[in-house]
Image (spheres, rainbow, N blue to C red):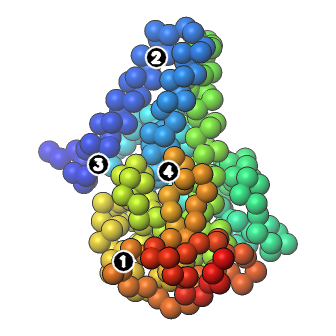
Amino acid sequence: MQFFRHKADRLPIALIALLFCCDVAIWALVDSPMVLAAWIIITLTPRGGICAYNHHHQHLSVFRIKILNRLLELIYGLQTGITSHGWVLHHSLGHHVHYLDQRKDESRWRRESGSRMHELEYAFIVAATAYPRMWQAARGRSSHRRVFVGMAVLTLAIVGTLFVLRPVPTLIVFILPMMMMLLHTSWHTYSHHAGKKTSSHFVASNNVLHRGYNLLTGNLGYHTAHHYKPALHWSQLPALHDKIAHKIPADCYLSPSVPWHIRQRVVGPPPGMPFAPGTSTAEDCESPSATATHGMPLQGQTPR
């Protein structure tokens, strides 16, 4: 019997499970706050990748067996701060349905006035409102709500028990990373859509085609393709992107973010990749300063 829906998930899930086992071992064996904090700091980058794979799982579950999916979601919840079905409600049934309407988008980057949020403002608002918006999205979806509530209670019970047993290790190894990764996930999504037009899937998202970034995030950089077909497995996104690249403007391609660059910039599509004419930047939003890969100004942008 095949447990995985897609073979491509085997290695990432094995590595994610290994990191979780290391977390448990560190929690059980280490008492020094300095060593505990050092462990969290040196594993921040892979934890960011785990957030991406949690996102993928909430679109298309990894396993064919429900109990294995619940177990994986329990691990994800303890690693990322997003419990089972949380992103199904907030992201899959919320953001993906509404992101072309900034009045409704659960991850909206526009203020009520219509102006563009600052990056940090967006990150803190999306993180702070994540669970209330999940609950709001759960209305009328009783099956999702039952799993969401049940698994959230179980996750909190586990964290509470761990805290009673070992307060300091639990705070450093589990509670703080859960909060940090929720904030990280919220911050990371800002560059996916902020400042883009919302007239179609092909102009509303930015893409990052950097190899290392997509290895870490499971091809999350192919973001236009992901929004075009949200239920498509992450391993199939590059092939879909190649089919729709001619519809995507050149300024929809960014450099990767941390840990590769402090700030992202527009880099344009790779050499030989077709792109659509015009710009994807909303008229009232300032476009990131950048030049294309070959040093030529991107179509629709003014050289700086």
The quarter in which the C terminus is drawn is bottom right
- How much space separates mark 3 and mark 2, taking CA atoms? 26 Å
Q: Which residue is mark 4?
A: 260
Is residue 245 visible from the viewing direction of this image? Answer: yes
Mark 2 or mark 1, which has the lower sequence index?
2
Local SS, label 1: loop
CB atoms of marks 2 and 1 within 8 Å: no
Q: What residue does disc 1 label?
A: 271
Residue at which label 3 appears: 9
| Amino acid tagged 2 | Ile
- Marks 1 & 4, CB-CB < 8 Å contact: no
- Residue type, numbered disc 1: Pro
Q: Position of residue 232 (x, y in %)?
A: 35, 66
Instruction: Look at discs 3 and 4 and give the one toward the viewer.
Output: 4
Does 154 appear above or below 258?
Answer: above
Q: Which quadrant of the figure contains the N terminus?
A: top left
Which numbered marker is on residue 26?
Answer: 2
User: Is 160 situated above or below 242?
Assistant: above
Label 3 sits on a secondary structure element that is helix
Nearest the eye: 183 or 32: 32
Considering only vertical position in the picture, is 235 above or below 271? Answer: above
**C-alpha separation, residue under disc 2 versus residue under disc 1:** 46 Å
Marks 3 and 2, the one that precedes in the sequence: 3
